Image (spheres, rainbow, N blue to C red):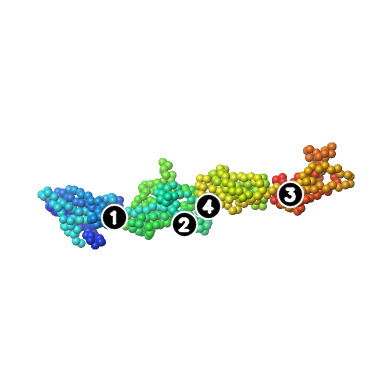
Amino acid sequence: PRAWFTASGLKYNDTYPPGQKHAWQLGSVCEGSASPGAFELGLSGSGPWRLEYRVDYWAWNNANSGNPGSVDRSTSHTSVAMQHSTLKTECCEPGLYRYTLTAVSDERYQQLQRLDPGYSASVADESLTVVEHRIMHSPQAELRAYMPDGRPMDVSARGTFLRKQPAIKHCLAPGQSRSDGDAQTWASIRDKLPVFRIEFEKDGSAPFHAWIEVFPASGPSEVIEIPDIKGYSQAVSLPDRIASQIGRYHMRLVKIRDSRGCERQLVDPSEVGLGRSSDKSGKAIAGGIEIEYIEAPSARPSSSSPAANPSRNVCLGDILAFDLQGLNSWNVEYIYNGARRSTSANKRLFRRIADEPGNFTLTRICHRSANDCCSDFEDLSYTVREIPRVRVSGGKNVYQDIIEGDMVDIRLDLVGTPPFTFTWQRRSLAADGAASANGGKVLESHTVKNFDGFSYTISTSSEGTFEVTFIQDRFCQYPKA
């Protein structure tokens, strides 16, 4: 009896390097192919036939593929064949498979007859007992995230790539989300956003084709197709409507294909396009990169604060109040008279009493949940002014008798920054001629405006109690409005 491989479906491969025999090959298939193929057998004698054959295997990454001295695995098999039989090929691991018919017996000659290894020439004949089949390695790729300067965002402190990294948090300055600015502003902002890249293994065959599923912060997921990727690294350009929305979104590779048509399905097709809300189990989306865009906190003077009105000065005793925006709970940093201070704020209104004159500057606020997401300020700086004051007759109670027809001088010493505006009054005395405990009746009232000096004299011949009821300098007043 005799057995051989027929030429049906085979192609002669003469590309092996010198020293290796050329071989007939079945058409290559991709890893994971549902129909890996089969060799047709030629048989002579009286069936049924019993065949013995050997399969030599070289892994796809074996640099000496096809060299008998570098084989990764050899296995022997036995098969029963009938007329017009085929020999099914291996189906799973990518690499080169060489099939060698080693022996055959039939109904008449039941003792196995050894077969000579026959590679045949460029024309297949009945001596062909060695054939090959190649299962091509499917492309491999990963999604990676980088800072605009090229630093990887998915690498641990030890420099190792985190395949299951937590959500990548990126801080956006207030107004940097796509909906907050015009197209020109957005173009400059995009250059500061993280860069996502598909990185293919170098053993793949370019150009590549990729499909990415993006789960925005809100709304259904969207599959983005990226064709004709000529290199091994490709930046992912996301649509503007989802590239920078405040909130958390997820992106993952769904499928990749190389120039040979080999595909790798990375996500079950039945799970693609369902969106977040369809996952009733509440599980996290498997695979890929999860990124959270956090808007940096902001602060602005509260409408109730004197700091909100640039024309109004901050005076001693005022409450400096700022409306905080962003995630609840902040770290607030400020400088008061050169001393740097930090405090936490859990409410959206941050208040600080101006309890000493000098300079107050709100310098920085950060989200406590993402302490590297901060905003710095240069325009929230205020000078806290002293309250103006006045001393009547040196600040002492002076009782002085006035002879009819004589005049007496009452001196007012003003402290503050001119010009001053103040109101002084003369009140009636008590029946015994002493100052009235309840202030007495107002007999006269005068307001002096825009006085540039620091000492003012009231000359009078009238009896009564003299007092200043209101004073205002360039910045502040007492009592407050």
> Which residue in the structure is indicated by mark 2?
149
* Residue appearing at x 19%, y 58% in the figure: 119
| Residue 473 spot, x, y in % from top left | 72, 50
Find residue 188 and name its label.
none
> Which residue in the structure is indicated by mark 3?
415
| Front residue (pair 369, 412) | 412
Dot 2: what SS? loop
> Which residue in the structure is indicated by mark 1?
62
Mark with earlier residue (2, 3): 2
Crowd tier of the residue under label 1, counting other residues whose Cα lies within 10 Å: few below 14, some 14–19, many 20 or above = some
Dot 4: what SS? loop
For the residue marked with disc 3, what is the amino acid? Val
* Residue appearing at x 55%, y 46% in the figure: 331
| Residue 174 spot, x, y in % from top left | 54, 52
| Residue 377 spot, x, y in % from top left | 58, 52
> Which residue in the structure is indicated by mark 4?
173
The part of the image, by quadrant, that contains residue 439 is top right
Separation of residues labelled 3 and 4 (CA atoms)? 45 Å
